[in-house]
Amino acid sequence: MIKTDIIIIGAGPTGLFAVFEAGLLKLKCHLIDALPQPGGQCSEIYPKKPIYDIPAYPEILAGDLTDKLMEQIAPFSPGFTLGERADTLVPQEDGTFVVTTDKGTKHQAPVVAIAGGLGSFEPRKPLLENLTRFENHGVAYFIKNPDQYRGKHVVIAGGGDSALDWSIFLTDIAASVTLVHRRNEFRGALDSVEKVQALKNSGKIKLITPGEVVKIHGDKDLTAVDIKTDESLIKHQCDAFIPLFGLVPKLGPIANWGLVLEKNAIKVDNALDYQTNIPGVYAIGDVNTYPGKLKLILCGFHEATLMCQSAYKRIHPNKRYVMKYTTVGGVEGFDGTKKQAPKAVIKSID
C-alpha cells in the first residue's frame, strides 16, 4: 500500500503543478498515470508542438514545459505509478480513499485529485481500406518527433488547429507538405489559416480544398494516396499520410466512481475549491466542468492552487495556515534544501 497526502490521478501539466502547490504546504503527493512517462498529452501526443499561452514563456515546446515542471517539483520528491490506469476508488471508514490500478497497485490518501485531462484518447480515423495495415509504415495520427519527416513528402488531412499548425511547422523540415481538407473553410485559428495561405502563395505548401483522401497505396510502406476533388481524382506520391481529425476522449473507469458527470467531464464546485460531489475528491484541469470553464493549461494551474489550499484544510482541520509568498520565503524541499529568495537591498539616495 502506497500512502501519501494527496493521490493525483493524471501526470499532465495540471497534475504536476499541483505537486508544487501541495509541496509549499508540506503535503506529499503520489501521481498515477496510464502513460509510461509524465507530461500527459504534452509528452505523448505533441512534445514538439509550441505553446504560446504559458506565462513568462512567449513560446515553449510542450515537451520542454513538462521538463520545466518536473524540475520545479523535484524538491518535493513526488512518487509516481506510471504505465498503470486508476481503476477503482473506494472510501475507507477513516475518511481516506484507496485507489487501485489495473495492475493491482494500491494507494491510500485522505485526498484524491483527478487531473486526468480529457481522459484517454483515441484518434478519429478515416474510413479507408487497409488503413491499419499502414500504421507505423507511413500512416500516423500523432506527431511525436517531427524530425522523422525530414526530407519526406507528407500529406496532412484535416481542418482544425492541429492540421494547420503541423502543416506550418513541417514546411521547414519535410521535402513537401500537402494539406487536404474537405471544405474551403477551416476550423482553426484565423492567424494559422492566414499563415497557411501565405505559405501556399509562396509555394511552400500545396493546399487542396475541397478534397478528401479516399485511398492509400503501397506494399509494405505507404507510397501514395488518392485525393478526390470536385473535378478529378489525383494519385499523389508521398511517404507519410497524417489524418488529424481530432481525438475521442474517454474517462474510462473514472466514469463509474459515482461522480456527477456532464458531457464526459466531472462537475465541480468552482465557487470554492473544485471539489466533486464526493467530499475529499477533487477534479482539476480539462477533466472538470463548471459554468465559464476554459480548457487551458494556465486555468488548470489556478484550479490546482485552490484545490491544494482546500486539501490542506481537510488534512489539517485544526491547523491554521498562513500563506507565505515564495518571493519572501523561498521554496523549501522535503529534504531541507531551500531555494531562498534574494534579500531586498535598500540603498539610500544622497
Image: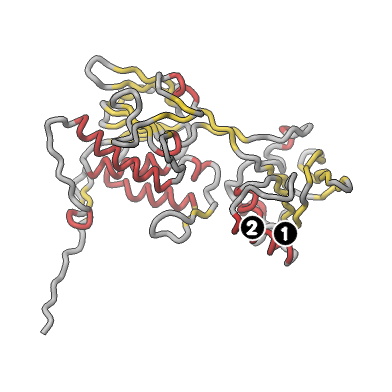
> Seen from this angle, which residue lies furthest front?
291
Q: Amino acid at mark 1?
A: Ile
> Seen from this angle, which residue lies furthest right?
232
Residue 173 visible at all: no
Residues 178 and 99: in front is 178
> Dot 2 lies on which element?
helix
Quarter of the view holding residue 141: top right
Query: Measuring 65% from the left and 43% from the top, which residue is drawn there?
Result: 244
Taking 185 as reference, is 192 left or right? left
Query: Measuring 43% from the left and 34% from the top, which residue is drawn there?
Result: 289
Q: Is residue 187 above or below residue 271?
A: below
Q: Amino acid at mark 2?
A: Ile
Query: Measuring 49% from the left and 53% from the top, which residue is drawn there?
Result: 51
> What residue is shown with label 1?
205
Quarter of the view holding residue 345: bottom left
Q: Position of residue 12 (x, y in %)?
A: 43, 40
Q: Residues within 10 Å of mark 1 (few under 14, many from 20)?
A: many
Q: Position of residue 84 (x, y in %)?
A: 45, 28
Q: In the rendered structure, which disc, 2 or 1, sits on the residue that comes first in sequence?
A: 2
Calculate the distance from the C-alpha at mark 2 to the C-alpha at mark 1: 8 Å
Query: Measuring 30% from the left and 43% from the top, which residue is drawn there?
Result: 305
Image quadrant containing the N terminus: top left
> Dot 1 lies on which element?
loop
> What number is the disc on residue 168?
2
Residues at marks 2 and 1 touching, judged by CB atoms closer than 8 Å: yes
Q: Residues within 10 Å of mark 2 (few under 14, many from 20)?
A: many
Q: Position of residue 75 (x, y in %)?
A: 27, 47
Quarter of the view holding residue 129: top right
Residue 135 visible at all: yes
Taking 150 as reference, is 113 left or right? left
Q: Position of residue 243 (x, y in %)?
A: 69, 42
> Seen from this angle, which residue lies furthest bottom?
350
